[in-house]
Image: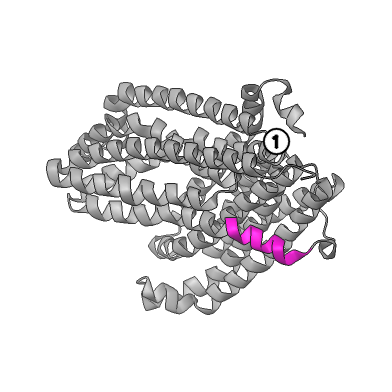
Amino acid sequence: MTTDDLTRHGLGRTLFTMTWPMLFGVVSLLGFQLVDSAFIAQLGVDPLAALAFTLPMQQLIIGFQVGLGIATTAIISRTLGAGDAALARRQGGLVVVSGAIAVAALGLLLWVLREPLVTLLGAEADLLPLIRTFWIPWLLSAWCGAVLYFGYSVMRAHGDTRTPGLWMVITSLANLVLDPLFIFVFGWGLPGAAWATVTAFTLGIAAIYPALLRRRLMHFDLLAINPAPALRQLAGITGPAMVSQLMPPISAMLATALVAGFGSSAVAAWGLGTRLEFFSIVVVLALTMSMPPMIGRFLGAGELHHVRSLVRIAVRFVLIWQLAIAVLWLLLSGVFTGLVSSDGDVAAALHDYLMRVPLSYGALGVCMLMVSVCNALGMPMRALTISVARLFLCYLPLLWAGAWLMGLTGVFNGALAGNLAAGLMSWMLYRQGMALLEQRRHEAPSPGC
């Protein structure tokens, strides 16, 4: 796919074509995770607690794999935009090999340190045998998931979002079918959930990697390139992108601690509201996956005017779409809160949340898009700056100020104001970054000088 292919039918239509497969893929992954937790919950409190102690480590692994996936898409798509398909194929092979080795090393380290880590997190001694039996298949499933994700990233970098989206759905469905079989029928219990994930991800790997090699999207002749500069380039984007991925969980813990001061009903309402937020912005999540390959191509070809046009289209769509979602929550808030909670205090607090916070989802979506766009433009530190500023200069301070001034309702108002401020701030930082890129291109010596 060339830049001419991207613009032939209009940028808006191309963006839609590349986004909808990612949308179905993201929704399927969210659904699989929810149902997976529901199956494990049927085993009792101890298995559910053992699963909970893997979440911080899982966020660490996912943060690394997503960071490397962002770097993969940015670098390969930029190389393709510059017209060097052979180098792009070798870069794909380098990403997969280095990523697989790095995640395996991280998994081995976590296995060696498993008992000190979970003990530090507060695990009781009687949980350690269950955690020990679960962590080997769980770490293997995390490695398989990372390797599969790297394959998806290489495909997306080459402009193919349909194949990754399809296999995200297929592997999620396979996991859902295998979960009750491995957990209950075979009697494997909690480890059975991890083995179901290993099996599903292995099915995806067996489909994705032969397709990558068959379509000549990836080569493993790594000696043909100098790996050191390529690895430094990958690390330069992966590091900041990984830190960006770890910021939201830290922020979520701090926000929950603040809300906890208002009682258990407030925490329950806040938890429900944040889950609804995640589903409300799922289209934005899909856009953050589909836009970078297009932006990288345009950047590599030196067509920054197309980048500006694409970003404007995406931002306008996100603002209109999320406003419609906010209006929907406003209309349904009275009925919905009664359905999800029979507790009057929880329902009242959730209604208060839905009357305010969804109005800022458009600005939150713009902020998320700008992080993705800046990474694709080769400005990872600017993307990291947006992530850190959003959470620690806009969101959390305004949550605290709202709580101090107006109590729980002030927290919701703070979330609204924080997201609005973050959206405006991210747009300004993106525009400054684009101005710097254009200035550098004008200052660069022309060929032959």
Magenta region, residue range? 226-237
Report the predominant secondary structure element of the magenta stretch.
helix
Residue at 48% of width from left, 53% of height from top? 245
Q: Is residue 266 left or right of residue 113?
A: left
Graded by Cα atoms within 10 Å as few (under 14), some (14 to 19) or many (20 or more), the crowding at tag 1 reads: some
Q: Please state, as top left, top right, bottom left or bottom right, where the C terminus lies in the image.
A: top right
Q: Please state, as top left, top right, bottom left or bottom right, where the N terminus lies in the image.
A: top right
Q: Is residue 87 left or right of residue 429?
A: right
Q: Position of residue 365 (x, y in %)?
A: 45, 35
28 or 327: which is nearer to us? Answer: 327
Can residue 353 be seen in the rendering of this structure?
Answer: yes
Q: Is residue 415 on the magenta stretch?
A: no
Residue at 61% of width from left, 23% of height from top? 12
Q: Which residue is mark 1?
A: 162
Q: Is residue 227 on the magenta stretch?
A: yes
Residue at 80% of width from left, 52% of height from top? 87
